[in-house]
Amino acid sequence: MTQKRILITGAAGFLGSHLCDRFIKEGFKVVAMDNLLTGNIKNIEHLFPLANFEYYHHDVTKFVHVPGDLDYILHFASPASPIDYLKMPIQTLKVGALGTHNLLGLARSKNARILVASTSEVYGDPMVHPQTEDYWGNVNPVGPRGVYDEAKRFMESITMAYHTYHNVDTRIIRIFNTYGPRMRLDDGRVLPAFIGQALRGEDLTAFGDGSQTRSFCYVDDLVEGIYRLLMSDYAYPVNIGNPDEITIGDFAEEIIRLTGTSSKIIYKPLPQDDPKQRKPDITKAKEILGWGPTINRSEGLKRTLEYFMTVIPKSV
Ligand SMILES: NC(=O)c1ccc[n+]([C@@H]2O[C@H](COP(=O)([O-])OP(=O)(O)OC[C@H]3O[C@@H](n4cnc5c(N)ncnc54)[C@H](O)[C@@H]3O)[C@@H](O)[C@H]2O)c1
């Protein structure tokens, strides 16, 4: 069997770097692409000596050229945390729209299968709970989060259009909150924010009254779901996430217990359009991919904490 070649955009980011590791392990030739807008080359530098690994520093909102054959494309380039996309709203819209268009064009010209990284944010502040793939969402297009949510909704639409009108082999994943090693401590997402504050002995800042919910999926489980979806023949969106739901208040207490800090929880007003609840319905992933999460929060948090202890200066 000939060795398969895969392009991964956003490769130096949190999820992209874990995907590079997984596809190298599966025996693929990996072409990594990133412009380091929010990523870190350190996440993939261990792969640079490998013959099966190439890196292109490139902005995918510009025309994307990759010499040679490609069998698969994973489009993961995009600012992904609220802090990042609120700081870079135009880049976020461009990478979801122009970037996705460029990569669909590349998939078409190479006859490659493409999987695009969508998000639970397409459901907005959901009126249906847990969220099923057939729920259309409740998104404010002109609110601050609209730049991310609508970019991803456009990404899904143009992907389906290339599937329908150009017969491109496409996959769409809706990723729910994922965590693990290589997240940035300062990316503003609740999990690294709490862990960073706890490890520095600061009070944990929770937004709202602590009753909003989130469901956190460990990165290795997500990567397995992505792998299975890519290898499946299913072209419609599939939720991948861990349905184990927890309130933000309880989660803050869990982090305080886990880190053994004497920090307290302080509550601040909820940001505009912040979703009140989040929990994936993963029936489809179970039925179509035989997928479900295998790593519970206490094990996942233990592994993540070990990573963060190596990146937080020893003096704190
Ligand atoms: N982490 C999550 O919980 C989560 C949830 C839902 C969806 N997603 C999606 O998964 C993808 C990866 O998210 P992440 O958490 O790894 O974020 P990340 O910020 O760590 O990684 C994104 C990467 O994309 C790169 N990038 C951004 N714009 C680019 C451009 N124009 N050209 C080339 N590279 C560019 C960044 O430099 C970075 O390395 C994103 O598309 C995000 O929307 C992530």
Image (spheres, rainbow, N blue to C red):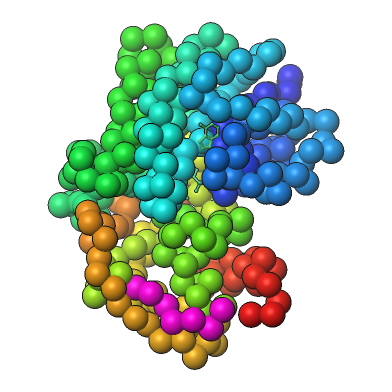
Residue at far bottom of view? 262
Q: Quadrant of the N terminus?
A: top right
Q: Residue at x 55, y 28 (%)?
A: 59
Q: Residue at x 42, y 22 (%)?
A: 98
**In front here: 7 or 42?**
42
Q: Quadrant of the C terminus?
A: bottom right
Q: Residue at x 51, y 72 (%)?
A: 195
Q: Residue at x 75, y 32 (%)?
A: 53
Residue at far left of view? 127
Question: Looking at the picture, does residue 242 appear above or below residue 86?
Answer: below
Residue 184 placement (x, y as % from top left): 56, 57
| Visible residue check, residue 223 | no
**In front here: 57 or 239?**
57
| Visible residue check, residue 168 | yes
Residue 19 placement (x, y as % from top left): 61, 42
Q: Which residues are magenta?
A: 200-206
> Which of the 4 image quarters holds residue 154?
top left
Residue 172 within the magenta-colored segment of the rendering: no
> Which of the 4 image quarters holds residue 68?
top right
| In the image: residue 191, left or right of residue 52 | left
